[in-house]
Image (cartoon, rainbow, N blue to C red):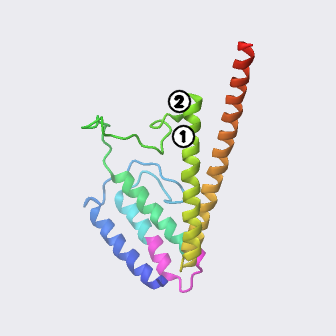
Amino acid sequence: MQQQQLIQRLEEKLQALFQTFPTDSKMPIFVRFDRSLFSEDFQDLAFYRQEIEQTFAYLKSLDTLSAEQFAFITTRLSAQCAALSDALRPKSKPTAPLNPINSKPVESSKAADPVHKLPPRERLEKYYEALRQLNEKIDECRDAAQFANDEAIRELALKRKAQYKLRRTKCLDAIELLEAYLAFKEEKTEKEIL
């Protein structure tokens, strides 16, 4: 897709997003944002909406953009929208799930997924499962980069692949450390038996 078509789709998405915002533009937003997203904290909704519109206007004003510039500005615009949407989302107290038997914990959170509390052998199994999943994700990113038509998409896929490789390295280190610990414990147990 060409940049002008993407800009047009972005404009449609922004208008749809703005429709979901509260109608009171003077509503204060009591959130501290990352400085790379918004210039000030604790402003009203109109201020943040204006900053998002300024980012979009800047994107539209540039005639020629490299794929990297386009990806950078659209990533910033996306992050601004996500941050403001999160700030506007009502904060509710966590409630007990309706069906606790079928509910699954969130796997991305360390607090929700107590792998570190498991016995060493079970933890090792979880680490190997995570390693398998990371390898699959690396393969998916490699394929996405290989078959991407747009340079920005290719760069994003390669960046994700590098992130997954870093996580895989950490996972391999954890596996190696845990295997060494288990070997040490086994050796110690054998010596105690003798």
Is the magenta region chiefly helix, strand or loop? helix
Say what secondary structure mark 1 lies in.
Answer: helix
Q: Earlier in the sequence, mark 1 or mark 2?
A: 2
**Quadrant where the image shows the C terminus:** top right
Residue sitting at 60 percent across and 61 percent down? 161
- Asked which quadrant contains residue 92, the reply is top left
Q: Give amino acid for label 2.
A: Leu
Q: How many marks?
A: 2
* Image: magenta residue range: 54-68
Q: CA distance from mark 1 to mark 2?
A: 9 Å
Residue 55: within the magenta? Answer: yes
Residue 173 is inside the magenta segment: no
Vertical side of 32 occupied by 73: above or below: below
Residue 178 disc label = none
Q: Position of residue 43 (x, y in %)?
A: 40, 54
* Picture disc at residue 118: 2
* x and y percentages locating residue 102 in the rendered image: 30, 39
Q: In the depicted view, which residue is nearer to us: 194 or 126? A: 194
Are the residues tagged 1 and 2 within 8 Å (C-beta)?
yes
In this image, 137 relative to 57: left or right? right
Binning the other alpha carbons within 10 Å of mark 2 as few (below 14), some (14 to 19) or many (20 upward) gives few
Q: Residue at 63% of width from left, 45% of height from top?
A: 171
Q: Which mark is residue 126?
A: 1
Q: Secondary structure at mark 2?
A: loop
Work out whether residue 69 can be spotted.
Answer: no
- In the image, 192: left or right of 41? right
Measuring from the top left, give residue 58's x and y in whole percent: 49, 76
Task: Identify the residue shown where x is 51% and y is 66%.
Answer: 75
Q: Quadrant of residue 45?
A: bottom left
- At label 1, the amino acid type is Lys
For residue 125, side relative to residue 95 (left or right): right
